[in-house]
Image (cartoon, rainbow, N blue to C red):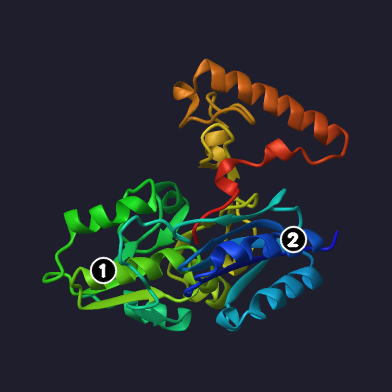
Amino acid sequence: MTPLIVAAIYKFVKLSDYVELRAPLQARCNELDITGSLLLAEEGINGTIAGTRTNIDQILAYLRSDPRLSDLPHKESAAIAPPFYRMKVKLKKEIVTMGVAGISPTELVGQYVKPEDWNALISAPDVLLVDTRNDYEVDVGTFKGALNPHITTFREFPEYVKNNFDPDKQPRVAMFCTGGIRCEKASAYMLKEGFAEVYHLQGGILKYLENIPEEESLWEGECFVFDQRVAVGQGLQPGNFELCYGCARPITAEEKASPKFEQGISCPRCHDSLTPEKRKGAIERNKQIELSSTRGESHIGKQNKKTKSSPS
C-alpha cells in the first residue's frame, strides 16, 4: 500500500475574508480526496490533513497561491492507514483557543528557536522550560526537566502562568508544543504579561523529532498526535499507544492488560465513570466497527472526537 502523507500546517496571518475562504477550500479538498481538518479564523489557518503525495502537493500549492499564505510552512509524516475519515474546513474565532483578547503573534511574539539550537537553550540553568500542552499529551512524552502545567485545555494556560510564575523571578522562559502553534501564542501572552525573554521551539516537537538524531535527543517518550496514529516517536515513526474510545485518552499496553480495559469501550481511566448510556452506545459502536471490518470497510463512527481536529 502506498503511504499517505500527513501534513500539519499553521500560520498566524490576518485573514479578514476567512469566512469566504471556507467553501472554495472545502471543495478543493474534496476534489483531491484530502481528509483531515482545517481551521480558518481572522488570525490565520491551522490544521492537519492527509492524502497522496500528489494531492497533498496540489492542496499546498492551492493554499500558497494566496499571497498571504505564500510562505505557509508545513510538517510531514507518513501513514499507512488513513489517519482521518472525512474532511472538514471550519470557521473559528481563534485557530488555537486561548480565550484572552488582544493576544496576536502577528503583533508580538517570542523568539523562535530552531530544533538544532533547542538543546543548548533548555540546558541553561536559568531557563524555565514549560510544556504548553494538555495533561494527557504530557503523559505520553515530554522534554527532560519540563514543567507540566496539568491543564485539560489551552484556555487554562493563562491562569496557570498567573498562579505559578513571576516575570521578575523567571525572566527567561522556553516553551514547546506539538507543532509550534500553541507555544507561539503562549509566547505572545507571556511577553504581554511582562516576561523579558520568551523562547519557543520552531516547528514544535514534531520538527525536533524529525531533525534531531536519537542519540542527541532530550525528548523522553513519544509525542501525542491528533489523528489515528495516536503517537509518534523519533523520526516521526508510529508509536506504541492506542486510543481509548471511551475517554479519547492514549493508552499503553500495560493499561490494555487491566481488567478495566474493554476494547472500544473503556480503559482504567474511564471504566468506573462511564455511564450506562455511554457504555451501551460504545458497545453498539464497537459492534458496528467490527461488522464493517469483516466487510473490509472503514466505519465512519470509528473516528473519535479527539482525532477530528486539534491544536498543534
| Residue displayed at 47% across by 66% down | 42
Give the position of the N terminus as an image quadrant.
Answer: bottom right
Kind of residue at disc 2: Ala
**Residue 27 image label:** 2
| Residue displayed at 38% across by 46% down | 152
In which quarter of the view is residue 37 placed? bottom right
Kind of residue at disc 1: Met
**Residue 2 image label:** none
Residue 78 appearing in the image: no
Residue 223 pos. (x, y %): 51, 58
Foreground tag (2 vs 1):
2
Residue 140 pos. (x, y %): 47, 51
Closer to us: 116 or 181: 181
Label 1 near label 2: C-beta < 8 Å? Answer: no
- Which residue is situated farthest in the top direction here? 276
Secondary structure under the numbered disc 2 in the rendered image: helix
Residue 310 appearing in the image: yes
**Residue 190 image label:** 1
